[in-house]
Image (cartoon, grey):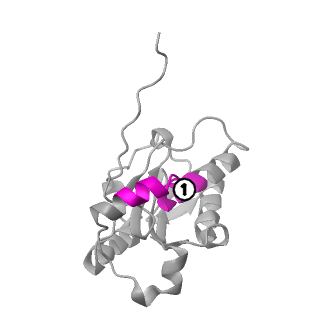
């Protein structure tokens, strides 16, 4: 009897390496539980867990030199962030870095050469793990949904729209697709 589980299909696009660029990410709590804080009168009040997440997001570059969190918002049951990921070589030669899609040959070569997780997945996994360890000192059970949503930011207009969305997220909480009335 074969007891192995079927391999889960990755939600990541195959043509993007997730090792460079700017990404908009959304990470939700397990069951959309409101454990990160509460929105009251249009102001987000963080719980202890939300405050810990806030500290982690502010200090990302202390632990991961290639990752910078440009902007974020913590909501009661999820958070959004704009994450900038740079290769060390790209940081040194930023003026020489062109924004382009890699060729088929470059993608194939990278698949052979690079077996490790992309930096974006590594960052999100490390962040979720750190917050979960802290949360388990106060509560039991899963903290995060197993996956996260990402969007590669495609240009200035896309980035500006996402930034505006993050800025207005707390004010628009009751219209948010993750909004739940807690019983």
Question: Is there any visible trace of residue 151 in the rendered image?
Answer: no
Question: What are the residue bounds of the magenta stretch?
Answer: 108-127
Q: Nearer the viewer, residue 147 or 138?
A: 147
Q: Residue at x 65, y 59 (%)?
A: 52
Question: Is there any visible trace of residue 39 in the rendered image?
Answer: yes
Q: Nearer the viewer, residue 138 or 17?
A: 17
Query: Image height check: is 179 above or below 98?
Result: above
The reply to whether the magenta stretch includes residue 5 is no
Helix, strand or loop for the magenta stretch, by majority: helix
Q: Nearer the viewer, residue 181 or 73?
A: 73
Q: How many marks?
A: 1
Query: Image height check: is 128 above or below 74?
Result: above
Q: Residue at x 31, y 58 (%)?
A: 15
Query: Image height check: is 104 above or below 177?
Result: below
Q: Residue at x 64, y 66 (%)?
A: 55
Percent x, y of residue 45: 56, 61
Percent x, y of residue 117: 51, 53
Q: Which residue is mark 1?
A: 122
Q: Residue at x 46, y 38 (%)?
A: 31
Corner quadrant of residue 19: bottom left
Corner quadrant of residue 176: bottom left
């Amino acid at each position: 009897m074969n007891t192995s589980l079927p391999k889960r299909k990755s939600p990541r696009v195959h043509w993007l390496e997730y090792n460079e660029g700017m990404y908009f990410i959304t990470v939700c709590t397990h069951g959309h539980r409101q454990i990160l804080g509460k929105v009251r009168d249009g102001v987000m009040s963080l719980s202890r867990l939300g405050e810990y997440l806030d500290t982690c997001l502010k200090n990302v570059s202390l632990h991961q030199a290639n990752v910078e969190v440009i902007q974020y918002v913590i909501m009661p049951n999820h958070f959004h962030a704009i994450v900038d990921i740079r290769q060390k070589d790209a940081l040194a030669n930023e003026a020489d870095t062109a924004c382009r899609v890699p060729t088929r040959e470059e993608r194939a070569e990278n698949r052979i050469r690079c077996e490790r997780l992309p930096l974006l997945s590594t960052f999100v996994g490390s962040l979720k793990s750190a917050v979960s360890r802290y949360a388990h000192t106060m509560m039991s059970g899963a903290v995060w949904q197993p996956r996260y949503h990402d969007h590669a930011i495609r240009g200035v207009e896309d980035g500006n729209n996402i930034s505006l969305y993050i800025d207005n997220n707390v004010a628009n909480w009751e219209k948010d697709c993750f909004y739940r009335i807690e019983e």
